[in-house]
Image (cartoon, rainbow, N blue to C red):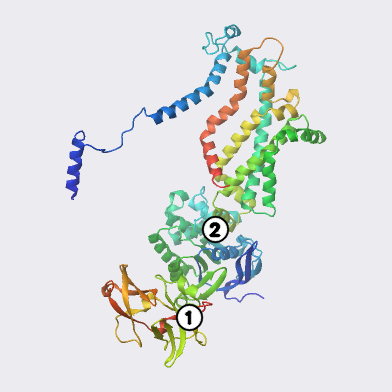
Amino acid sequence: MTAANDTSVSIQDLSLNFGAVTVLETLNLDVADGEFIVLLGPSGCGKSTLLNCIAGLLDVSEGRIFIKGKNVTWEEPKDRGIGMVFQSYALYPQMTVEKNLSFGLRVAGTPKEEIAKRIARAAEILQIEPLLQRKPAALSGGQRQRVAIGRALVRDVDVFLFDEPLSNLDAKLRAELRVEIKLLHRKLQNTMIYVTHDQIEAMTLADRIAVMKGGVIQQLDAPQTIYNRPVNRFVAGFLGSPAMNFIDGRLEDAAGGWRFAAEDIKIPLGTYDFAKPPAPGPVTFGIRPEHVSLNSGTGWPFSIAANVEVVEPMGSDTLVWLKLAQQNFSVRVTSERTPKNDEAVTLGFDPMRASLFDTATGTRI
Amino acid sequence: MSIADITAQASVAAGARQEIAGPYGPKPRRMISRRNVFLYGTLFVMAVYYLLPLYVMIVTSLKGMPEIRLGNIFSPPLEITFEPWVKAWSTACTGLNCDGLSRGFWNSVRITVPSVLLSIAIASVNGYALANWRFKGADTFFIILIVGAFIPYQVMIYPIVIILREIGLYGSLSGLVIVHSIFGMPILTLLFRNYFASMPEELFRAARVDGAGFWGIFLRIMLPMSLPIFVVAIILQVTGIWNDFLFGVVYTRPDTYPMTVQLNNIVNSVQGVKEYNVNMAATILTGLVPLIVYFISGKLFVRGIAAGAVKG
């Protein structure tokens, strides 16, 4: 069996064990040609390990890997048609930028004119022409990461692998380079697989995000789908800042239809889109702080009264903390409409925006 | 408080420092504090302790025998003579040969240079392979190698005599070179392994993605970055092998004796008059090579030791 033509990278039943520790478990992933995939997850979830397996830097325990329809499971990294960008940049300190860029080509025995041509092209794309004769020590972090990207670029690879490339940069540079990577992807149309623990990077860059935990892909979807319809409580809690509000309670079959109940709070779920047939039982109700509106009148089929506990102004907007059913609950409001501490407010939201999770298994209902 | 207020206050304080009580500005440091006396006193005593014998050696080596017999070992020479140095180098007798230390010096050079090069070349590749290419049984191999560093040399002397005899190298310089290379292996491999392990692993991975193989990464990426550790290894090996006496006396013949063995034979000869000045000159000559090595590369030595010590 070979992968279909339009898949660039295909991972089939991949497992990896270090002794008794299972790092990746029967993992399957198909990446389309030209797609930007982000592997997102907390540290230790196996995302970097997966990337190293794709790169051929780690031997797999089970399964196989196809790149461009070719089974590369046993191939050396250089024969896989991949270029890799590392978190620490990993530039060769004793070589100039030019030598760094050309190292792979020189190892492969590419003719001199060809090397010069490719370096010129990469330097132009990344705007590092004035730096070519410098040593890495004389570059700033952002420049180093550009050179590191250039090293993958000159090799004319099919697939770019990024291993947390922006984690060592400060916040401002990170935002800048994020945009540059996105532009680069638009310009080159290469397949890119990008590992990060930063949800903003994931949301902004990805065509599809694979959220990982414990060596298993929890959800693989477009960023908006992952954000709005997380398949389980882990994904729901991992994405979003401030995080999604969770209230533990019960799902009840009442006269007016299904409703969520926690202590004295009753939320009718009229417009909620159930992922599977509902059944009464303990559930966790989740809603994002920006999907709740404060004191917005009677537009909702229900309203909840609460008292403001703390107000956190964040500049562009304000986070209001309350207690609902003795659990912390946050609401995001615009700065002009900030309530005061201890003010009594009413909350309203569209149940369609909410997520319900089985309390025991954590999966979406 | 405005900036003008603050500056005004500061200038008042500066002008009236005597009148206003309380500390102001940098804390005064006394030159003769208890701490300084202890520190520099200890340093001075230690320096004298180590330098005095050297002083006596140099002074004695520049005196003639009549002056030495006066017995004032600390007094500087009344009449400086280089005769003992010349004699130690070119005419002192050891056994049947009367061509001084020069023979031993060249023997030592012919032993040290190939031993140092060979042992470092092998150990650096060993260390690199152990640190970066985790092959099956690497840990076992490493443990065996380290255990080797703790086995007393005396245990192995006789077996090695037999081995060298069987392969026909007993008594030759190349036999001794092999022995030195093998005995340097455990500590050097450990040194190199730790140094290479302290290098960022992503560098190694990047080189692999770039298509460099085992030797390509070693020669083009790792070697150019490891000058300090090579200097440390060279110093360790040069001094260790140059100063070696035991292997030299066991595995060579009188005409291939290294300098240390020859020195011993000159100094400990029981016939005739003890020529203290010649003995001193001969000893300094023998110790000169390690001394020069230290002086030239001391700074790099410290740097390399520190770099290798970070990760174990």
The disc label shown at residue A114, or none:
2
| Front of the two marks 1 and 2 | 1
Q: Amino acid at mark 2?
A: Glu
How many numbered discs sit on the rendered protein? 2
Q: Earlier in the sequence, mark 1 or mark 2?
A: 2
Disc 1 and disc 2 in contact, CB within 8 angstroms: no
The residue positioned 36% from the left and 27% from the top of the image is B32
The residue positioned 62% from the left and 32% from the top of the image is B238
Q: Chain of mark 2?
A: A
Q: Are there few (<14), some (14-19), or many (20+) residues within 10 Å of tag 1?
A: many
Q: Quadrant of residue B23?
A: top left
Q: Is residue B33 above or below residue B5?
A: above
Q: Position of residue A306 (x, y in %)?
A: 33, 78
Q: Is residue B179 above or below residue A111?
A: above
Q: Nearer the viewer, residue A94 or B267?
A: B267
Q: Nearer the viewer, residue B282 or A147?
A: B282
Q: Amino acid at mark 1?
A: Val
Secondary-structure class at tag 2: helix
Compute the Cα span from label 1 to label 2. 62 Å
Q: Nearer the viewer, residue B159 or B115?
A: B159
Secondary-structure class at tag 1: strand
Q: Chain of mark 1?
A: A
- Residue A32 seen in the current view: no
**Is residue B291 shown left or right of residue B109?**
left
Q: Quadrant of residue A20?
A: bottom right
Residue under label 1: A283
